[in-house]
Image: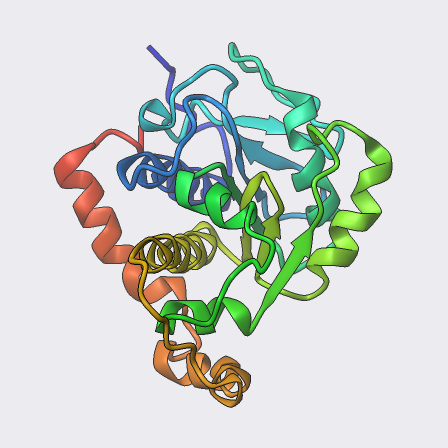
């Protein structure tokens, strides 16, 4: 049983731990997890470059606020924890956290729909309202093998640029956000656009693409629709859903 860290960390770190643990469990609930692989990382408030990440080997549906491991930019533990980490798996995340101050949370998945579209030469197609949100802030990064090499980091950062969404070709999906809530909602939209695309292409019928001019105007429209809060609008409801179906993440 994990010992609660609630009284051993700052209030801001504890809140981040709760939200990040919730994000892990929600990824599992929506079926985007890949056993114990992939990561969601979040930067802890403060001057130190410290981050929270999943304990390696724990299923996403099991993760709690106290079980999350505190690491540095090298993926090394900076606080006592009985759980191991996978430093190699933090390669992608550390590159983005270091380059993007606004990317407080980085979410990466190997979902079946996401990987399927990442293998398609044309990438995300303008076939749905969800896809227009993605296309308004999307980068692509070519597959270079399992992400272990430090020299891949500059190319990852360059391909993401100032976007919210990054498609890792032949690999999966990645989103960034100012919070776990923002990164999660972005991933929900990304995954939905990929699922719709896979189903539309499987229908064996002529498709109706969305006018490129509409895609161009989506970025400003999205700010109006979400009130600038983005993930914050859906997050309370998602947490209530999680409490009904898989409580205990805030332990």
Residue 230: image quadrant is: bottom left
Decide which of 117, 101 is in the foreground and name it: 117
Residue 223: image quadrant is: bottom left
Percent position of residue 95, x then y = 74, 43
Percent position of residue 219, x then y = 51, 80
Q: Residue at x 41, y 22 (%)?
A: 35
Decide which of 175, 141 is in the foreground and name it: 141
Q: Is residue 12 left or right of residue 137?
A: left
Is the residue 108 above or below the residue 63 in the image? below
Residue 138: image quadrant is: bottom right
Query: Which residue occupies the extreme right position in the image?
Result: 151
**Residue 77 in view:** no
Percent position of residue 205, x then y = 31, 65
Q: Residue at x 29, y 61 (%)?
A: 234
**Residue 123 in view:** yes
Is the residue 102 above or below the residue 238 in the image? below
Q: Is residue 80 left or right of residue 195?
A: right
Which quadrant is the C terminus positioned in? top left
Q: Residue at x 43, y 40 (%)?
A: 20
Percent position of residue 239, x then y = 25, 48
Q: Residue at x 66, y 31 (%)?
A: 90
Decide which of 122, 159 is in the foreground and name it: 122
């Amino acid at each position: 049983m994990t010992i609660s860290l609630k009284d051993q960390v700052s209030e801001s770190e504890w809140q981040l731990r709760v939200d990040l643990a919730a994000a892990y469990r929600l990824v599992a609930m929506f079926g985007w997890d890949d056993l114990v692989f992939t990561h969601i990382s979040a930067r802890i408030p403060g001057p130190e470059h410290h981050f929270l990440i999943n304990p390696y080997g724990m299923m996403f549906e099991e993760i709690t606020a106290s079980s999350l491991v505190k690491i540095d930019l090298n993926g090394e533990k900076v606080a006592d924890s009985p759980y191991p980490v996978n430093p190699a798996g933090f390669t992608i995340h550390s590159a983005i956290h270091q380059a993007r101050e606004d990317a407080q949370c980085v979410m990466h998945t190997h979902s079946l729909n996401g990987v399927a579209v990442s293998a398609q030469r044309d990438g995300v197609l303008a076939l749905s309202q969800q896809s227009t949100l993605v296309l308004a802030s999307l980068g692509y990064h070519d597959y270079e093998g399992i992400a272990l090499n430090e020299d891949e980091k500059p190319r990852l950062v360059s391909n993401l640029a100032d976007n919210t969404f990054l498609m890792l070709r032949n690999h999966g999906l990645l989103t960034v956000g100012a919070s776990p809530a923002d990164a999660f909602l972005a991933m929900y939209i990304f995954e939905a656009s990929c699922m719709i695309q896979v189903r539309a292409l499987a229908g064996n019928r002529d498709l109706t693409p969305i006018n490129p001019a509409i895609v161009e105007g989506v970025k400003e429209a999205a700010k109006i629709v979400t009130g600038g809060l983005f993930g914050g609008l859906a997050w309370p409801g998602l947490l209530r859903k999680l409490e009904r179906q898989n409580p205990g993440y805030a332990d």
